[in-house]
Amino acid sequence: MFGRPGSRLVAGANRQRCFSSSSRRSADFTHVVIGAGAVGLAVARQLSARPKTQTLLIERHSTVGTETSSRNSEVIHAGLYYGHNSLKTKLCLEGKRMMYDLCEKQGIRYMNCGKWIVAQNDEQWQALVDVFYFARSIGVPVHYALQKELDSEPDVSAKAGALVSSSTGIVDSHGLMQYLEGAFLDNGGDVVFNTQVTGISKTYAGYVIETVDGEGRQQEPITTETLINSAGLQAVNISNMLLPKTRQLTPHYAKGTYYSYSAPMPKPKRLVYPAPIPGHGGLGTHLTLDLSDPPRVRFGPDVEWVDDPTDYTPNQSRMEEAINDIQSYLPGIDRDAIEVDYCGIRPKLGKNSATAGENFQDFYIEHEEGYDGFVNLLAIESPGLTSSLAIGRHVDQKLYGNE
Ligand SMILES: Cc1cc2nc3c(=O)[nH]c(=O)nc-3n(C[C@H](O)[C@H](O)[C@H](O)COP(=O)(O)OP(=O)(O)OC[C@H]3O[C@@H](n4cnc5c(N)ncnc54)[C@H](O)[C@@H]3O)c2cc1C
């Protein structure tokens, strides 16, 4: 079943027991990672670098990164929104540094274009001031836009002012994932596509994983000493396969629709975000650029609570509202040049806020109590792409400690 060219077959013989804290016998694999999105790939690459271990990455689709990791804004976030002592702040800051470094070293396309957060009134300005003090307190460079900077973007409305974040950028998420997959395989990792995890049970030696292939045929069970659940929108369902009823959760999903823009103007040179709204499920319908030459403008994503995590049909009915939001900071926008483009869906654990404050949902990354070797990654929404490399390291530390 491990049929991907270049991947190695199960190599049980030469494996040293690296996972600590018990004397279990070895299984087919030292590590199994479920889900080949940006985060699962980063975790798999990190774990596969451990000598004398064997890591398997299981993905239900035919290639890497076809779900949330290819349906986002590709922004390398600065870490401005997630409050003190949150995993999102810690991993976003670490991840941002690691991401710029990796892109530079490995030739992955990126652009450190910076971003503005703009305010149109006193209330929004106050939100920017809060972001400013928070950013300064954690060492993230920000400054209030000077008049000459505001003049350099005449199409952008910032009636009450703008906050400039110089460390924000964008990354080619596909290039990143291609690199991570290659590095994982180079480390001797195995990847198996068209394979969906359908059941998990705990044994004395670790975990037994049931899977079906693309045609729904049951496959040989896979055994592993450690198991990392990085299944994105399905991660709560995977977790519920293993944890007892009292620890089961209900998944929530927040769809975000993107809009393309076909007119040549206005075309700002950096990302533009509205002031954050406390308690909101996202960061507001913002303007991002892509890495084409010249960069294309796109807008989004908004927030729409949905029940179906597989329905990627963009919701046309929300366009009017989105355009009104966009026009608040880009008044000269040509409304007729905006079209619905694509969607992404955020994995959530409730109708929570994406930014610090009341009802804030942090990343949930736990080495589950009573489930030695099982690391659960839930609600890995934004800034999950930015944080992916740091999450890989964090999961390694959860399993092995700070060696
Ligand atoms: C609209 C939107 C905008 C965003 N913008 C940004 C941004 O600008 N910057 C940023 O840093 N982050 C952003 N994010 C967040 C970022 O995209 C995610 O945090 C990140 O892509 C999550 O990666 P992942 O690997 O956890 O999940 P995914 O990419 O969803 O990968 C999970 C994988 O698990 C597989 N899987 C699921 N169930 C099974 C199963 N049973 N068996 C086998 N495989 C399975 C899936 O097929 C999938 O490939 C955004 C997210 C959204 C939705």
Image: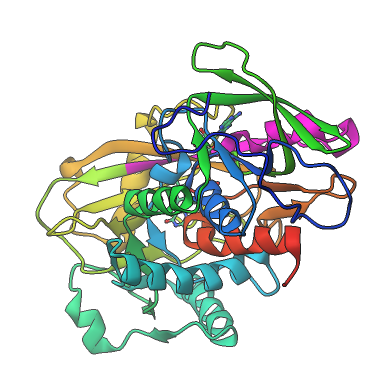
Kindly identify the residue that appears in the image at 31 percent across and 63 percent down: 329
Kindly identify the residue that appears in the image at 62 percent across and 54 percent down: 353
Depth order, front residue of 311/10: 10
Q: Is residue 162 placed above or below 157 in the rendered structure?
A: below
Could you tell whether 276 is left or right of 226 in the image? Answer: left
Q: On the image, which quarter does residue 76 sit in?
A: bottom left
Where residue 221 appears, as percent x and y from the top left, is 69, 23
Kindly identify the residue that appears in the image at 58 percent across and 25 percent down: 196
Where residue 105 appears, as percent x and y from the top left, is 34, 71
User: Is 252 colored magenta in this rendering?
Assistant: yes
Q: In the rendered structure, which segment of residues is drawn in magenta?
A: 232-258
Rendered-image quadrant of the C terminus: bottom right
Depth order, front residue of 316/197: 197
- Count of marks overlaid on the render: 0
Where residue 383 appears, as percent x and y from the top left, is 52, 59
For the question of whether residue 12 can be seen, the reply is yes
Could you tell whether 180 is left or right of 84 in the image? Answer: left
For the question of whether residue 119 can be seen, the reply is no
Q: On the image, which quarter does residue 290 sit in?
A: bottom left
User: Is 242 colored magenta in this rendering?
Assistant: yes
Depth order, front residue of 132/121: 132
Q: How is the image coloured?
A: rainbow
